Image: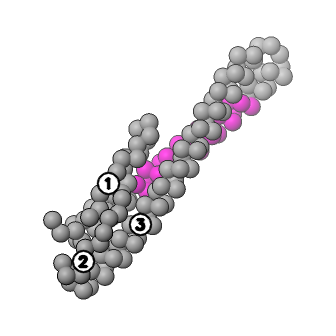
Amino acid sequence: MIRTMNLCRAGFLSSALMLGVVPTAAALSASTSSECRAQAKALKAEQAEALEKRTQRDELLVEVEAAGDEWEAAEAVRLFGANEASKADIAKADYHDRRSELTSLEADLQSTVTDLNRHVAAYNTKCVKK
């Protein structure tokens, strides 16, 4: 049976799956059984991709937070001179670049998880006996 687990972090991610066992051949026809095994294998690959993207997102989130802290610190001394103002502008641009990258990665992750959940539902409908 396939079950879903919550992968939420700060409300960013809906869910992905944990794959269990594939139904036995006795429960399904031979062709359906082989299709289900193939689907289960594909789902495991999709799950690994979603988990990798989640890891990348979590690592980038730490970088974005650090860049925000650097920008905040640079803004505190912006008025001390042209050099400090320039550093604050660079820190601000770095923060916005990283935040944009995080937004893009999050959208990609959400898309991957949405597809994964759709594929899990199809697998459950076809392959899991209730």
Residue marked by disc 3: 44
What's drawn in magenta, residue-wise? 90-114
Image position of 59 with respect to 32: above or below: above
**Inter-mark Cα distance, 3 to 2:** 18 Å
- The verdict on residue 29 being magenta is no
Mark 2: give few (<14), some (14-19) or many (20+) Cα within 10 Å. Answer: some
Residue drawn where x is 31% and y is 79% of the image: 35
Which image quarter holds the N terminus?
Answer: bottom left
Residue type indicated by callout 1: Thr
**Mark closer to the chain start, 3 or 2:** 2
Residue drawn where x is 66% and y is 33% of the image: 67
Q: Secondary structure at mark 3?
A: helix
Check whether the beta carbons of the residues at disc 3 and disc 2 lie within 8 A of each other.
no
**Mark closer to the chain start, 2 or 1:** 1
Q: Residue furthest bottom?
A: 30
| Eye-nearest disc, 3 or 2 | 2
Q: Nearer the viewer, residue 8 or 97?
A: 8
Residue type indicated by callout 3: Lys
Q: Main secondary structure of the magenta part?
A: helix
**Inter-mark Cα distance, 2 to 1:** 21 Å
Q: Secondary structure at mark 1?
A: strand
Based on the displayed image, in which of its 4 quarters is residue 65 positioned?
Answer: top right
Residue marked by disc 1: 4
Image position of 110 with respect to 67: above or below: below
Residue drawn where x is 53% and y is 50% of the image: 55
Residue drawn where x is 49% and y is 46% of the image: 106
Residue type indicated by callout 2: Thr
Check whether the beta carbons of the residues at disc 3 and disc 1 lie within 8 A of each other.
no
Image position of 122 with respect to 74: above or below: below
Residue 108 visible to an observer of this rendering: no
- The verdict on residue 109 being magenta is yes
